[in-house]
Amino acid sequence: MILITDGGSTKCDWIVVDNNGEQLHEKIRTKGLNPAILKEKKLKKIIRKSKELITFSHEVTHIFFYGAGCGTEKPKVMLKEALESIFINAEIDVQEDTMAAVRATLNQVDEAAVVCILGTGSNCSYFDGQRLHQRVLSLGYSLMDEASGNYYGKELIKDYYFNKMPEDIKVAFDHKYNLEADYIKYNLYKQPNPNAYLASFAEFMFLNKDSDYINALIKNGIRIFAKNMIFQYREELKTVPVHFAGSIAFFAETEIREVAEELGFKVGNFERRPIEGLVTYHTNQL
């Protein structure tokens, strides 16, 4: 029995398959398991809270976990140890979420491409057909993550407080969310996963895309992301496409294509949820 996991900061999707790739259970969802943010005790608690995962815990032979926060060694090892303590019979492979995006968006396994994630957080790497190259190590939501859900959440809240929103958008934003200062600060500074809290505001953009203000906000975030991250691979962009994964990328496809034309890079595939492509990839590898 194989578990394949697409783990973000907001949520994790788990698919249980047999060695032939046949799905044995409906998709399981848990809270996010970002080991760069959460402590090992919290990681274990989230996993154990899923009755379905615990039911399968002794039968699982392989876990392929792709996760936000798994790009550096220390959090990656911590998450692996947390998984090993629960899935005691499983071989466990933990990879950064960018590799999930690579394997889910490529047209063929040895294709070279620049691959971006725009979800709760954001990232960008170059895959040369065999290995992943990352020229900028992420410093997380407080310093980086342009064009991500948490980036747009921050921008919306700041524009609301700095009175930069058009009045109709400001009224709609105020109606949809609790924007009291104390409530926002409580969620940002006293609750776990502040990045996921910020990302929850991004939905508002896609419900109001007909607004010139929202359209400009989306495109500006993409421009910053492209200049800071995608253009780290300026030479590679001459010959390879840029693929995108994640819910922000999926819903902002039109704006991404417009910015790509403006800045001069070639857009490839969009994949909202990489996990479906990972099932095919891993069952073919067994």
Image (cartoon, rainbow, N blue to C red):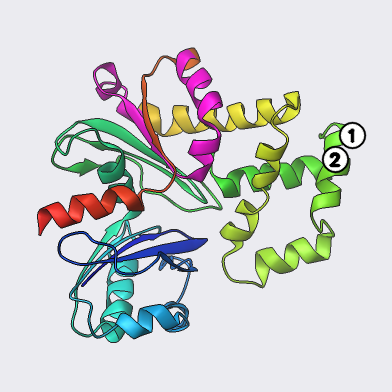
Relative vertical location of residue 105 with respect to residue 119 in this rendering, above or below: above
Alpha-carbon span between mark 2 and mark 1? 5 Å
* Residue 79 or residue 254, whichever sits in front: 254
Q: Secondary structure at mark 1?
A: helix
The magenta segment is 232-261
Residue 183 figure quarter: bottom right
Question: Which kind of residue does numbered mark 2 sit on?
Answer: Lys
Tell me, yes or no, if residue 187 can be seen here: yes
Relative vertical location of residue 38 with respect to residue 271 in this rendering, above or below: below
Q: Residue 243: x percent and y percent?
A: 35, 32
Residue found at the far left of this picture:
286
Quadrant holding the C terminus? bottom left
Residue where numbered disc 2 is placed = 170
Left or right of 237? Residue 108 is: left
Left or right of 95? Residue 230 is: right
Question: Which kind of residue does numbered mark 1 sit on?
Answer: Glu
Quadrant holding the N terminus? bottom left
Residue where numbered disc 1 is placed = 167
Residue 285 figure quarter: bottom left
